[in-house]
Amino acid sequence: MLKILLCSIAGTSFMTIYSYRQAKRHQEQFEEPVMLSKLVHRIAPEKISAKASIPAGWLIHYSIGVSFNMVYDQIWKNSSLKPGLASGFLLGVPSGIIGMAAWFTALQLHPDPPHTHLRKHLEQLFIAHIIFGISSGLCYRLLEKNNLH
């Protein structure tokens, strides 16, 4: 479980850095933790303050990373795929599609979603998940090479 946690932190952190850089580059709101905190606060503003929703957004974001890595871990243990750059890329592609579908759905169904340029947001999100997959794959490989289970 330590490997899953460490690689989730690495993968989620690298994807988040990419999203923050893309947000700044495009002058758009793409930052997943910020958007998640707004989704949380705006769904129940009388119960969850804007300030309290910030750590919730980060916790949700990293928890989703753990969930993805739990799936990756099972794939790497039970298939011919082994952790690394190539398999991280291969796992990042469907993760990106899932992430795009989840964000599209959340933004469409939420009564007061944060503003974002949807097409640009989904495009950068797809790439961010590939970065997540690659980072997770390389982290797993490094930890396995150093016998950390």
Image (cartoon, rainbow, N blue to C red):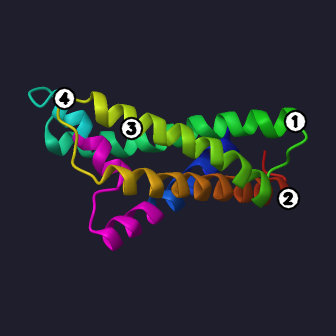
Q: Residue 7, how many percent across, how many down? A: 64, 51
Labelled pair 1, 2 in contact (Cβ < 8 Å):
no
| 84 w.r.t. 106: above or below | below
Report the Cα–Cα distance between label 3 and label 1: 31 Å
Labelled pair 3, 4 in contact (Cβ < 8 Å):
no
Report the Cα–Cα distance between label 3 and label 4: 13 Å
Question: Which class describes the residues within 10 Å of circle 1: few (<14), some (14-19), or many (20+)?
Answer: few
Q: Amino acid at mark 3?
A: Phe
For marks 4 and 1, give the one nearer the viewer: 4
Helix, strand or loop for disc 4? loop
Please report the residue visible at 81 percent of the width from the left and 40 percent of the height from the top: 76
Reading the image, the residue beneath label 1 is: 79
Q: Which residues are magenta?
A: 17-38
Reading the image, the residue beneath label 3 is: 104
Q: Residue 110, how many percent across, how many down? A: 25, 30
Labelled pair 3, 2 in contact (Cβ < 8 Å):
no
Question: Which class describes the residues within 10 Å of circle 3: few (<14), some (14-19), or many (20+)?
Answer: some
Reading the image, the residue beneath label 4 is: 111
Q: Any mark on residue 97, and which?
A: none
> Which quadrant of the structure image shows residue 137?
bottom right
For marks 3 and 1, give the one nearer the viewer: 3
Reading the image, the residue beneath label 2 is: 145
| Nearest the eye: 82 or 106 | 106
Which badge, 3 or 1, comes first in the chain's sequence?
1
Q: Is 124 inside the magenta-drawn segment? A: no
- Residue that lies at the very extreme toward the bottom in this rendered image: 25
Q: Amino acid at mark 4?
A: Pro
Labelled pair 4, 1 in contact (Cβ < 8 Å):
no
- Residue that lies at the very extreme toward the left in this rendered image: 46
Question: Which class describes the residues within 10 Å of circle 4: few (<14), some (14-19), or many (20+)?
Answer: few
Q: Amino acid at mark 2?
A: Lys
